[in-house]
Image (cartoon, helix red, strand yellow):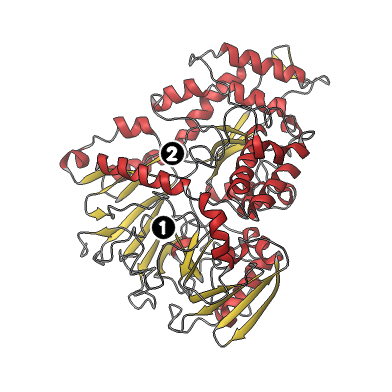
Amino acid sequence: MRPDYFLKFRHITALAALAIAPAMTAGFAAADGHSTPTHGIAMYGDPALPPDFAHLPYANPDAPKGGRIVQGEGGSFDSLNPHIRKGSVPWQLRFLAYESLMGRSWDEPFTLYGVLAESIEVADDRSWVEFTLNDAARFSDGSPVTVEDVMWSYETLGTVGHPRYHGLWGKIGSMEQTGDASVRFTFNVEDRELALITGMRPILKKAQWEGRDFTESGLEAPISSSPYVIAEWEAGRFVSLQRNEDYWGADLGFRRGTNNLDEIRMEFYADGSVMFEAFKAGELSTHREFNAEKWATEFAFPAVERGDVVLSEIPNQRPTGMTGFVMNTRNPIFEDWRVREAMISAFNFEFINEALTGSRQERIGSYFDNSVLGMEDGPATGRVAELLEPFKDELLPGALEGYALPVSNGSERNRAGIARATDLLAEAGWTVQDGEMKNADGAPFTFEIVLKVGATENEKMIDIYVEHLKRLGISPTVTKIDSAQHKERMTNYDFDMAYFRRGVSLSPGNEQMLYWGSDGVTEPGTRNLMGMNSPAAEAMISGFLNAKSREDFLSGVKALDRVLTSGRYVIPIYHFSTGRIAHKAELKYPERLPMYGDWIGFQPDVWWSENPDN
């Protein structure tokens, strides 16, 4: 897969990532100058593309239309509405079946260009933002997208929609129609990112929901303005999206060369191994592989050898985010950081990594690892130390001094890790009594690990982990449940330990408060699964949201990374600095890759089929 191109790509995108911060000081003056309507907006500086750009740099404007892609998905679904708390929904529908005022370029840290809105205007201090709709914007039933639809969508999502939308609505002081096709949002807080976030909310057709309860999940296809419409589905089995040949925005610069496939079909499987066999048999046309050992050893099947299936590796410059097993601190057992550190020490990552991946994958070191935003080794220094100093009395050990994950010798016994875990648990009041870990009152140390049915690799990791925990006198319960039950339990924080994945971007912003903010301790449906309540984390987020210098932005994120990592909320596993996609040879993607790599907006958005009649 074009190895010298990838080396060049890594070099270019590394420079681009490093350019985020230097652009900030000079860029704020440019951003503040957006007092007239423009075609796009960047968080810092100006958009990279001009007003008349022909296409996104990672899209092929000459790509043929036609063909299909069949994707395998784990679990099940019972709803087609991804904007409410109820129901289990195919996650892709948020992005494929709906459209927003602005669209994000994945070749820039955080830049938006017009989609439903033909222009955006912001105050010099970004205290308000105004959008003017494109006159040509239409829903899939042919009706125009109106300001009334926009205002109804924002209010509905912000009040009764999924909690992910509530934060923005609470920061909008007023919303008013300012012209036949324009709407202005005025903010009640100082937050420079809000102008961009406001442009990214899905726009729904008001008339479709009149006289109905929006909060009830259901299997009704939406009337939307996106390039695809949901054409067929069977609950729990498949969803088929068809390209709308009458899509109103096909000639927009933002859309040219995207949405090339006639059909995007999602087939659902209860078991990951069965799904992989279905791909090998040709029933699916694409498969993402997250296990490097499996990628190296189990993809030499006949279709690959014949050239019918291609193995593609897609590099990226994203931060790692956090992947692993989260501990719910709402459970008193996990309130004590020493207990959480003990659970991490007992995990024996090096042995598990060797057993499952041949030690081919690197471990995540922190939430913003693998990027210029990640915390540095050793004690906090300079501006990072200054930002954390006011919170030194509440910070956990390692935030200021430096924190690194324990490393075992790779042996199955993990004697040092088990010994350290035993000592930490004893400090926290837990000792082995009659072969079982108990507290001073004789209550056993027990908890439940919740996994989704079909998550084969997670099950393998937990099976090994449970055996290691038994050496501590701990025997957790492992519960495997279907997608709908899993979503319900995660929404209500009804678990002790569970698989956890949080992706983060090169431009972290308000979403960080949804991930780690104290509202999530009690409010259902947030992304704060660990239940963390940290004034220091919230202060770091508020600080970099309004940073006006290179140093303050980078230092704020690095400081947040220290607070999160030293919090010991998650047992980290490996990160995926390279995407691995096996796919039918007829499916192609542009040689020019986006900075974010295989991320939202890549497959299937910019892919096409060389066999469009199939």
The answer to whether 155 appears left or right of 248 in the picture is: right
Q: Is residue 74 visible?
A: no
Q: Amino acid at mark 1?
A: Gly
Residue holding disc 1 = 601
Q: Nearer the viewer, residue 159 or 374?
A: 374
Q: Position of residue 456 (x, y in %)?
A: 45, 36
Determine which of the numbered discs, if any, sits on residue 540 in the image.
none
Q: Nearer the viewer, residue 144 or 173?
A: 173
Q: Position of residue 357 (x, y in %)?
A: 40, 28
Local SS, label 1: loop
Q: Residue at x 44, y 55 (%)?
A: 600
Local SS, label 2: loop
Q: How many marks?
A: 2
Q: Nearer the viewer, residue 412 or 576?
A: 576
- The C terminus is located in which quarter? bottom left
Which of the 4 quarters of the picture holds residue 450?
top right
Q: Residue at x 46, y 47 (%)?
A: 17
Q: Residue at x 45, y 66 (%)?
A: 97
The answer to whether 257 appears left or right of 345 in the picture is: left
